[in-house]
Amino acid sequence: MRSNYQFRPNSQLDTIIFDLDDTLISWAKPQIEWNKFLKPMFAKMHAYLVELGYELEQEALARGFGRNTRDAWDHARAHDHHIAVSMGGVLHRALHDLNLPADDIDIEELMRHADWQPFPGVALYPDTHAVLDELRERGYKIGLITNAFQPMWMRDTELVTYDLIDRLDARITSGDTGFMKPHPAIFWRMLGMLDSAPDRAMYVGDSPAHDVRGANETGLISVHIDPPHLDKQPQSPIEQPDYTITTLTDLLPIVERIRNC
Ligand SMILES: [Mg+2]
């Protein structure tokens, strides 16, 4: 553990916000490839569109979705404006490219038919529940921000599966917010949902470029979780965290020390 935390005389830490992927759940051992994972989703969306009377090939839908997803993320990264990619927007463009009347199709209903599922092999860290329960026991508000292009209701399926949903006071995806980490807008939105403020909040995530930088630029205490299966190191001073931890359990003494400052 390392610390360059500066005591903030007027602050009282009462809020701890987490990233999801590789922070609360581990992607160390995925069991299938993305293409195989997505295939049933395209089959279900294709079946729904066919049921509505549209003619299209399932493969064409998958290709169009893949191309538009890559283009949208490339555009977002290239311009460094951190405007979020949304799955609904990607689907709309993919349908338009297939010469379907995208404006007439209920995209949200189409996404419901996709029936998003947890990724095989992705699992909780052994201490995730215990740490969240301990933090709640100590009275902290708990939030979640994920840079995901799905709406939160889609990823809620995973939060239910991992028994996380009732352990969170608020949760958002970048797809819902319009901006993605490290943009301060998504941090401010979560702070508002939790009725908190940057000098009362800590943020924990595995990505120096998204999680740590965003927390630093918004003024939260930043914690970099650096588990053994990852090696994401800070590339610039703004990506330097206040603390680095290996497991979530490492967080508990840090929070305790800040409380006793
Ligand atoms: Mg992550």
Image (tube, rainbow, N blue to C red):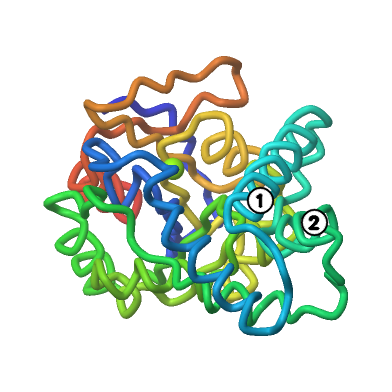
Hey, which quadrant is residue 68 in on the image? Answer: top right
Q: Residue at coordinates 34% horizontally, 30% vertically from top-left?
A: 244
Q: Is mark 2 within 8 Å of ligand 1?
A: no
Q: Residue at coordinates 43% horizontally, 27% vertically from top-left?
A: 4
Q: Is residue 12 left or right of residue 133?
A: right
- Identify the element where label 2 is drawn: loop
Whole-number angstrom distance, CA of label 2 to CA of label 1: 8 Å
CB within 8 Å, label 2 to label 1: yes
Q: In terms of depth relative to the viewer, which is nearer, 185 or 110?
A: 110
Quarter of the N terminus within the rendering: top left
Circle 1 Cα neighbour tier, 10 Å, few/some/many (<14 / 14–19 / ≥20): some
Q: Is residue 20 left or right of residue 196?
A: left
Q: Is residue 234 left or right of residue 97?
A: left
In the picture as drawn, the residue positioned furthest to the top comes out as: 235
- Identify the element where label 1 is drawn: helix
Circle 1 residue: 60
Q: Residue at coordinates 66% horizontally, 78% vertically from top-left?
A: 108
Q: Which mark is residue 98?
A: 2
Q: Is mark 1 within 8 Å of ligand 1?
A: no
Give the percent coordinates (x, y) of residue 196.
Answer: 57, 69
Q: Amino acid at mark 1?
A: Ala
Q: Amino acid at mark 2?
A: Leu
Q: Which mark is residue 257?
A: none
Give the percent coordinates (x, y) of residue 80.
Answer: 78, 32
Q: In terms of depth relative to the viewer, which is nearer, 172 or 100?
A: 100
Give the percent coordinates (x, y) of residue 47.
Answer: 55, 74
Q: Is residue 36 above or below residue 107?
A: above
Q: In terms of depth relative to the viewer, which is nearer, 42 or 74?
A: 42
- Sequence order check, earlier mark of 2 and 1: 1
Hey, which quadrant is residue 32 in on the image? Answer: top left
